[in-house]
Image: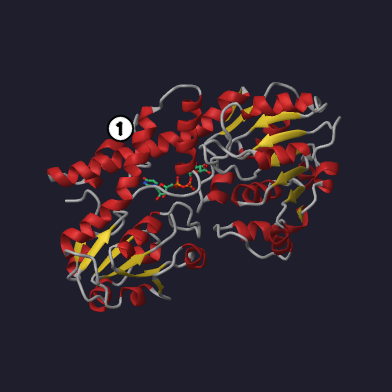
Amino acid sequence: MSDAGRSQREPIGVIGTGYVGLVTAAGFAELGSRVFCVDIDAEKVGRLRAGEPTIYEPGLQELLARNAERISFSTEPGEALEHARLLFVAVGTPPTYSGDADLSAVHAVADAIPPASDRALVMKSTVPCGTGATLLRSFSEQGKAALAYVSCPEFLKEGSAVEDFMNPDRVVIGDEGGWAGDAVQELYAPLRSTVVRTDIASSEMVKLASNAFLATKISFINEIANVCEETGADVVEVARGMGLDERIGPKFLQAGIGFGGSCFPKDVDALKQLAGNTGYHFQLLTSVIEVNELQKRRVINKLQRHLGTLAGRRVALLGLAFKPNTDDMREASSLVLTARLLADGASVSAYDPVAEDRARELMAGLSFAPSPLEALQGADAAVLVTEWQELCELDWPAVAQAMAGDLLIDGRNALDPEAVRDAGLRYEGIGRR
Ligand code: UGA
């Protein structure tokens, strides 16, 4: 983009510098906007100011460094409020005990905006359908009728968030008309993506429904995999055959040990809860969640079938993060797997190229190894939990030599069964022949 184009771009505020906020900030800075980031966590702000990474996300550090002069970080909203009309909200919305989303951080942002302020909150945080309407009502009760609201849900995937920001499948903008929705659309214009302009409630629902649908696709193929195991079919072949139907599509048909992360488990629950609050029982999502929970435990049955009792056995876990290219451990299948193995008396060694520090905070009782082969040393069985590329390309003869046993469970159907078998290991995938 030309310097003239860049200088005409709307400056923005980004409230919350977690994974969504930081990628949004870096992405818009790359497109030429001046970005004022705000976070209440002083330690995080200090690290970001010093150029230190706070999350692991491929390409993010480079983007932040390249655009450092256009991005500032502060614990106070003053500068953002002074310079930016559009305030992107990317704060946490964790579930409460009732299963509803905790919107206190979102309300705190709205409360910090002075009355008579011609600004707009642009919601990036995942919120229940109806949040925009509630906030707009509270703006007018607080004498902040000039404050606009735009729903602009986020569809970034961890591990490819920068790429996803720069090449979105679509940009969804929900608003009530007025300047703010147009201004947000203008910000995204250089990406030349399909833009869906709609009302606020529909935009909020697009986000929840998209995540719930993708999670449903995964639970569906996992159930097909489980049936394949009983019938002699191979789920990888089945998914290939299904995915070529354009109405189905090939993506998110990879069977494995279940979905995790900060989004699917939370958002599927949130949509089920949202429906329940209106008196509607979202039966399908109840099954999606249950299938996913059972799927995480099926590996234990496989280990028991091959090893008998797990007490005193040594099991190596390859990968711990909820998926590759991230250090995120939230709702990772490895957490359930480790706890079950330890409860059954197994000893567990694990290797993850990036998530070890986060895993150490959450998991006690297992030993962390500095390399895959050290984790595999003396193991009776190994489980591929996260399909990091380096773990898919291990030297299988060396693996066979390091292990005491020969069982390798491919929890992500990511390995080449022939290569593993040629090394003298027993390969077992999820729903594979
Ligand atoms: C997900 C959505 O894909 C994003 O569009 C959305 O923006 C994001 O949630 C969010 O709401 O913030 P993410 O959680 O980063 O992104 O990760 P995914 O790549 O969707 O994977 C989620 C889980 O599903 C992982 O545990 C992954 O291993 C599992 N998965 C994915 C499968 O088991 N099989 C598949 O075929 C695909």
* Residue 87 visible in the picture: no
In the image, residue 177 above or below residue 31: above
Left or right position of 124 against 75: left
x and y percent of residue 297 in the render? 30, 52
Residue shown at 34% from the left, 65% from the top: 317
The answer to whether residue 154 is visible is: yes
* Mark 1 burial class by Cα count in 10 Å: few <14, some 14-19, many 20+: few
Residue 37, given in percent of the width and then of the height, sits at 74, 50
Q: Residue at x 66, y 51 (%)?
A: 17
| Image point (45%, 43%), residue name | 265
Disc 1 residue lies near ligand 1 with CB under 8 A: no
- In the figure, 413 relative to 168: above or below? below
Judging by the rendered image, the residue that carries numbered circle 1 is 245
Task: Report the amino acid beneath label 1.
Answer: Asp
In which image quadrant can residue 88 be found? top right
SS at circle 1: loop
State which quarter of the image contains the N terminus.
Answer: top right
Q: Position of residue 31 (x, y in %)?
A: 69, 46
Write down the quadrant of residue 372 in the picture. bottom left
Could you say where residue 302 lies in the image, as x and y percent from the top left? 21, 56
| Residue at 43% across, 76% down | 370
Residue 50 occupies quadrant: bottom right
Q: Is residue 175 above or below residue 170?
A: above
Q: How is the image coloured?
A: secondary structure
Query: Would you say 77 lies left or right of 67 here?
Result: right
In the rendered view, would you say 158 is above or below 131? below
Marker count (numbered)? 1
